[in-house]
Amino acid sequence: MTVLSLIAAAIAIIAAIAAATYYYNRPVTVRIAVGPPNSDDFKVVQSIARVFDPQAAGRDRSSIKLRIVPTEGSVQSAVALDTGQADLAVIRGDQQLPKDAQTVATMRKNVVALWLPPAARPRATKRAAEPKIGKIEDLAGHKVGVIGRSQSNVNLLRLILQQYGVPEERVEIVQFAPSEVNEAIRGNKADAFFAVGPVNSQITTDAIGATVRDGGAPTFLPIDLADSIESRYPIYDAAEISPGAFGSAPARPEETIKTISFGHHIVARKSLSESTVTAFTRQLFSMRQALIAANPSAAKIEVPDTDKDAAIPVHPGAEAYVDGEERTFMDRYSDLIWWTILGMSLLGSAGAWAASYLKKDERTNNTSLRERLLVMLSQARKASSHEELDEMQAEADEILRDTLDCYESGAIEAGTLTAFQIALEQFHNAVADRRLFLATEPAPLAPVRPTRAAV
């Protein structure tokens, strides 16, 4: 019985380990908030979801599957993450983040472009005049058109103006949708334009290209205080826009322009499983080639900043992948498995002792029955009648029944049962010998009663 218990315990342990392994490696569906639906970010995330889909990709299985949660923009994506409607979110790095948001990957780097259309400069005379706006400080008293409806772009422009000491109320800020830029330029609705996006942003490139008229070229305003902004606001980095980044013939810009940049990130809730984030990050970068083939904009995706002083802390799961310190299932749970096996072994031993203790009375009773059988063995050799042997045989049958019940319940071991069988066999032999003796023994002579005549 003990052997069977150990086998059952071993099977249970193996089944538990197999179940834990399956649970650890099972496909996990992760919700990611991104928006608006017509944005480049949304299209990139759609491409990631398609590449992650094992059926669409022709793979047998995928550790992570994505379910897109559409939002109206980066701010709403952050709210979805904060309220638990999503596990991941694509958000701007310079907006207010959820308190427990941690970086998983950098979707892209954005740069600030600030330029003047040719109409912002006076017509040339025999002696060229200086433009009315030559630097950011000159924007005071003018109108700046911000491309895009995001309030975050307006906030960033105000931050730059503040750094240059330009009073906020001295600059009129007007927002234009990308589709409204051409009309705004034709109508001279702004003296300068402000755009935020990746260096190769089609929206920014088209907006700058729309300002080119009559052979003129836009004038870019450098952000020379980019280093000061970076030191005061770690979320921003000093950066440069290379010549021709927004088009050529003529090159736009014509020379390197200093500016600031910041990241668009995929962030996760701090409470999201480390193993899930590690699997997502590994899958994202291991499938990078397929992802770029599906959407070239995915080439901008980068690993997160793992420095301890990073503006946005990195999620431990992503950090483990980037630093090459991923932990396998056995790395994570080997100690737990070992302690589980040890605990089950101790529980098995304790259970066996408890079972043995509870069956102590049965063993004691069986020992007394065996002693009784040995006594009956001696009595059988001296029995004086078949009736007496029949009574002892019936009692031996009861002892046999009780002994077999004890063996079935585990109260006695196989060795004890073997000793009992030897004693029972000797008893049967003694009974058989005594019956033979009683059958062949001559009947005793009846005593002779004296007759009256003899008296």
Image: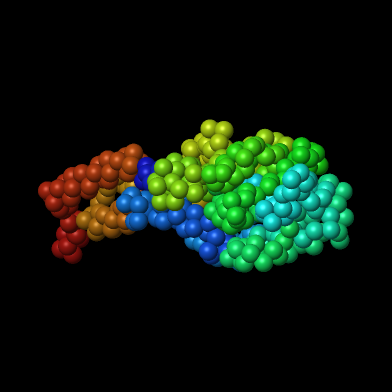
In the orientation shown, which residue stands out farthest toward the top? 324
Which quarter shows the C terminus? bottom left
Against 303, residue 384 (above or below) is below
At x 72% / y 49%, what residue is drawn? 124
**Residue 113 located left or right of residue 88:** right
Say which of 231 and 48 sits in front: 231
Instruction: Estimate the x, y position of residue 107 in percent, counting from the top left.
Output: 57, 48
Q: Quadrant of residue 119?
A: bottom right
Q: Which of 331 and 224 is in front in this view?
A: 224
Looking at the image, can residue 132 be seen?
A: yes
Q: Is residue 309 above or below residue 84?
A: above
Say which residue appears at 69% left-offset and 59% top-offset: 146
Which residue is most to the front?
126
Q: Where is residue 330 in the image (x, y as percent from the top left)?
A: 48, 37
Q: Can residue 343 be seen in this view?
A: no
The image quadrant of residue 230 is: top right
Q: In the picture provided, is 344 more to the left or to the right than 116?
A: left
